[in-house]
């Protein structure tokens, strides 16, 4: 998770402005600190040079007295002090000769061993005191007259070098450059971090928009941000929700139109076919009672033929009833129903059919499902139809039918819902058939009309529930999952969720 997510939520413009302000502040702070540091170093260096020059002049004034006499030992001591103060290459000359050669020294007396006092030193003139201040080759000269008590004795010539100051200025430039590069490198890193934090949700939105364009309305993008991108993400999610609702509404309208067409067709068929079928059924009863052969073998064959004809008449009547039921609006009669009792009753009613098909049924219950506000009759037809389809899928091979019932939190986060899973171990459903499984008139069963699953989904959706058909993962067979809200009005009404 990016570090910027931990910061207080701000608008994008505010965050960018704060980032630029922070970069400018860091650059100004770095330049200011370097300025003060360099200024102090330059001042100290200049002060040291000035102190050295002053010391040289002070030495010349103090050591050369008004009488013009000089003590070489004292001069040597002060030479050492000048060196310690930063003055180098010190020379003292008189009339172009080193000063030590012009100073007379005490000599012993003649043979009597008596010593004479030193003669009076001659007055000094053309004195030149030279020295160098600073490191490196000297490039400037400071020359001052040497005047002691109003008498001009010579010159103090100090050669000095500005390379140390130049080095300080160069070092200052390098520090400023490095500081500036460092600050802007840090600012660039922060900008990259900010841009990465901004680009990632935009890329997610672009990817999600492409998926929506391809027809996937289940896609959602993270919308926990509090800035403009978060607002855009929430608006995108609301848009996909609205598109999904509209798609589901359009799908339901198409189904309603189909049901209306079927209802109109069924009402006409009921008048044209149902009455003749009743007459045929009554005629078969008369034929079996009055015209049955006396011979037992012939009578048995005659009776079987009559029964086949009656079965076909009943099949046609069932087809007409299915058309009528699918075409007319459902009338819901919600009462308090125990879904577990409905499931047990359906399993008991189909136990003989399951035994003939060599199918073992298993019922699994999580906790106590309790009661729900449902139409018991319609829900029983749903459960019956799904269990019967599972048994019929295993008629050739036999197998196991597992029914699992649980009460879970609703998908929308409000209330609770029943989850009913009916799984078989048959051959499964062809992938190409899954999207059309709940469409009217679609059936792969021999003699099937294709209205059973369509009617099942219609009943479930009228209850505000959902149904999903899929092949089982990792094992053979298919499973149908039904979600029904416990209370009336809870849970979203879904379209075709077959996958």
Image: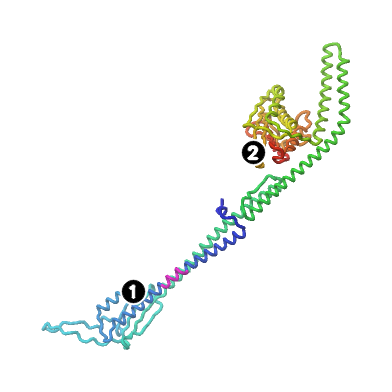
* Residue 292 left/right relative to 392: right
Residue 365: x and y, percent? 63, 30
> In the image, which disc is placed on residue 114?
none
Q: Which residue is mark 1?
A: 85
Badge 2 crowding class, 10 Å Cα cut-off, few under 14, some 14 to 19, many 20 or more, is: some
Residue placed furthest toward the top: 295
State yes or no: residue 37 in magenta. yes
Mark 1 to mark 2: distance in Å?
Answer: 90 Å
User: Which quadrant holds residue 20?
Assistant: bottom right
Residue 74: x and y, percent? 26, 78
Q: Main secondary structure of the magenta part?
A: helix
Residue 131 vs 278, above or below: the answer is below
Q: Nearer the viewer, mark 1 or mark 2?
A: 2
Identify the residue at image location x=86%, y=28%: 274
State yes or no: residue 330 in magenta. no
Residue 151 vs 461, above or below: the answer is below
Residue 21: x and y, percent? 56, 63
Q: Which residue is mark 2?
A: 409
Instruction: Say which label, 1 or 2, has the lower sequence index.
Output: 1
Name the element at disc 1: helix
Q: Quadrant of the C terminus?
A: top right
Name the element at disc 2: strand
Of 190 and 405, the residue lying toward us? 405
The boundaries of the magenta stretch are 35-43
Number of numbered callouts drawn: 2
Residue 223: x and y, percent? 63, 50
Badge 1 crowding class, 10 Å Cα cut-off, few under 14, some 14 to 19, many 20 or more, is: some
User: Which quadrant holds residue 294?
Assistant: top right
Residue 333 vs 1, above or below: the answer is above
């Amino acid at each position: 998770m990016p570090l910027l997510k931990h910061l207080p939520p701000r608008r994008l413009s505010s965050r960018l402005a704060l980032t630029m302000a922070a970069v400018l502040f860091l650059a100004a702070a770095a330049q200011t600190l370097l300025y003060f540091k360099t200024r102090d170093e330059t001042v100290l260096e200049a002060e040291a040079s000035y102190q050295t020059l002053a010391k040289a002049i002070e030495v010349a004034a103090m050591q050369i007295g008004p009488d013009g006499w000089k003590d070489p030992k004292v001069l040597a001591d002060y030479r050492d002090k000048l060196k310690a103060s930063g003055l180098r290459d010190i020379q003292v000359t008189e009339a172009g000769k080193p000063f030590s050669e012009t100073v007379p020294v005490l000599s012993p007396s003649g043979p009597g061993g008596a010593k004479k006092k030193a003669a009076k030193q001659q007055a000094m003139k053309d004195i030149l005191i030279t020295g160098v201040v600073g490191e490196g080759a000297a490039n400037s000269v400071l020359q001052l007259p040497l005047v002691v008590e109003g008498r001009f004795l010579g010159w103090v010539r100090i050669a000095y070098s500005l390379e140390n100051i130049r080095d300080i200025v160069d070092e200052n430039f390098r520090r400023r450059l490095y500081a500036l590069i460092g600050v802007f490198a840090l600012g660039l890193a922060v900008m990259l971090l900010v841009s990465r934090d901004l680009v990632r949700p935009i890329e997610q939105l672009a990817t999600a928009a492409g998926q929506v364009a391809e027809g996937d309305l289940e896609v959602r993008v993270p919308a926990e941000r509090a800035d403009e991108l978060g607002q855009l993400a929430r608006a995108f999610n609301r848009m996909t929700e609205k598109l999904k609702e509209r798609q589901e509404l359009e799908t339901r309208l198409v189904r309603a139109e189909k049901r209306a067409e079927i209802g109109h067709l069924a009402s006409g068929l009921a008048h044209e076919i149902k009455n003749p079928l009743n007459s045929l059924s009554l005629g078969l009863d008369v034929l079996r009672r009055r015209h049955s052969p006396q011979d037992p073998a012939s009578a048995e064959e005659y009776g079987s033929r009559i029964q086949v004809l009656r079965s076909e008449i009943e099949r046609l009547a069932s087809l007409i009833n299915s058309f009528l039921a699918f075409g007319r609006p459902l009338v819901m009669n919600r009462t308090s129903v125990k879904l577990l009792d409905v499931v047990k009753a359906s399993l008991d009613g189909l136990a003989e059919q399951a035994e003939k098909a060599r199918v073992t049924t298993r019922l699994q219950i999580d906790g106590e499902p309790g009661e729900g506000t449902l139409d018991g009759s319609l829900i029983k037809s749903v459960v019956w139809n799904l269990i019967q389809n599972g048994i019929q899928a295993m008629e050739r091979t036999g197998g196991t039918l597992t029914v699992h019932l649980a009460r879970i939190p609703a998908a929308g986060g409000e209330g609770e819902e029943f989850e009913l899973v009916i799984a078989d171990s048959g051959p499964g459903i062809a992938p190409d058939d899954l999207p059309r499984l709940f469409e009217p008139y679609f059936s792969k069963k021999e003699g099937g009309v294709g209205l059973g699953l369509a009617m099942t989904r219609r009943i479930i959706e009228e209850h505000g529930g959902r149904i999903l058909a899929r092949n089982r993962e990792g094992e053979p067979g298919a499973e149908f999952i039904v979600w029904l809200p416990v209370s009336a009005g809870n849970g979203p009404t879904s379209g075709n969720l077959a996958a």
